[in-house]
Image: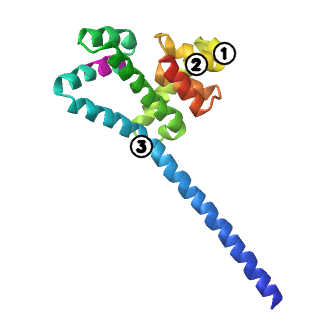
């Protein structure tokens, strides 16, 4: 009888431990999903705010975003004069570019490993990772200088630099997601 009670207590303790672990896993899954969705929500919210500000404002910022994001060489250099030429106030232009880079970096530092498995996005992340490896090979000083090196790498608009590559490089050299994100935002 006593052995049965002891066995029942042990089983109940095991069951409680399993339930705790399951809850931890569920919480981790919710956090992972949130980390995946939050950057997209921030980008969509910014687009909606710009759209609500008027078609002219939306078009100007969309043009700057397109130049900045989709010109592989010189996008960062061309986006600022283009934005100023379109009549965007310098403070608004800087805030928009920093916000855009911060959202891209946030997505990558939070979801670097998971993003590779997402259809369409995975191939882009792998290309950025390849660029990050090339950047590490080309700019070896960035690894030696850690955080400061990452800031400098993102700061200068050279080939294989920028927020996406900087986010990957930061993770590749072993920086935490927070420090990588801060380095990228400061470098932007």
For residue 12, above or below residue 159: below
Q: Is residue 64 magenta?
A: yes
* Mark identifier at residue 137: none
Q: Residue at x 53, y 33 (%)?
A: 109
Provide the secondary structure element on which disc 3 rests.
Answer: helix
Residue 50 percent across, percent down from the top left: 25, 29
* Mark identifier at residue 37: 3
119 left or right, relative to 61: right
Q: Which residue is mark 1?
A: 145
Provide the secondary structure element on which disc 1 rests.
Answer: helix
Look at the image and tell me whether residue 182 can be seen: yes
Look at the image and tell me whether residue 131 can be seen: no
Name the residue furthest right: 2
User: Disc 3 and disc 2: Cα gap in Å?
Assistant: 26 Å
For residue 136, above or below residue 24: above
The crowding category of the residue bearing disc 1, from other C-alpha atoms within 10 Å (few below 14, some 14 to 19, many at least 20), is: few
SS majority, magenta: helix
Q: Which residues are magenta?
A: 63-68
* Mark identifier at residue 150: 2
For residue 57, above or below residue 4: above
Pointer 3 and pointer 2: residues touching (CB < 8 Å)?
no
Observer-nearest residue: 93 or 39?
Answer: 93
Nearer-N-terminus badge (3/1):
3
User: Disc 2 and disc 1: Cα gap in Å?
Assistant: 8 Å
Name the residue furthest bottom: 1
Quadrant in which residue 169 is drawn: top right
The crowding category of the residue bearing disc 2, from other C-alpha atoms within 10 Å (few below 14, some 14 to 19, many at least 20), is: many
The quadrant of the picture occupied by the N terminus is bottom right
The crowding category of the residue bearing disc 3, from other C-alpha atoms within 10 Å (few below 14, some 14 to 19, many at least 20), is: few
């Amino acid at each position: 009888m006593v052995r049965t009670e002891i066995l029942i207590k042990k089983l109940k303790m095991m069951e409680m431990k399993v339930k705790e672990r399951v809850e931890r896993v569920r919480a981790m899954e919710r956090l992972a999903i949130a980390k995946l969705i939050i950057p997209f929500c921030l980008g969509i919210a910014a687009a909606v705010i710009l759209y609500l500000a008027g078609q002219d404002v939306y078009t100007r910022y969309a043009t700057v975003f397109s130049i900045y994001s989709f010109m592989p060489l010189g996008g960062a250099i061309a986006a600022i004069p283009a934005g100023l030429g379109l009549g965007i106030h310098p403070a608004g232009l800087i805030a928009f570019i920093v916000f855009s880079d911060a959202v891209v970096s946030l997505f990558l530092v939070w979801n670097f490993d998971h993003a590779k498995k997402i259809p369409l996005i995975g191939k882009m992340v792998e290309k950025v990772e390849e660029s990050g490896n090339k950047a590490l090979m080309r700019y070896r000083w960035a690894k030696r200088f850690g955080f400061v090196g990452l800031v400098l790498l993102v700061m200068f608009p050279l080939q294989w630099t920028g927020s996406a590559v900087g986010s990957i490089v930061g993770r590749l050299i072993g920086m935490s997601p927070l420090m990588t994100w801060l380095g990228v935002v400061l470098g932007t």
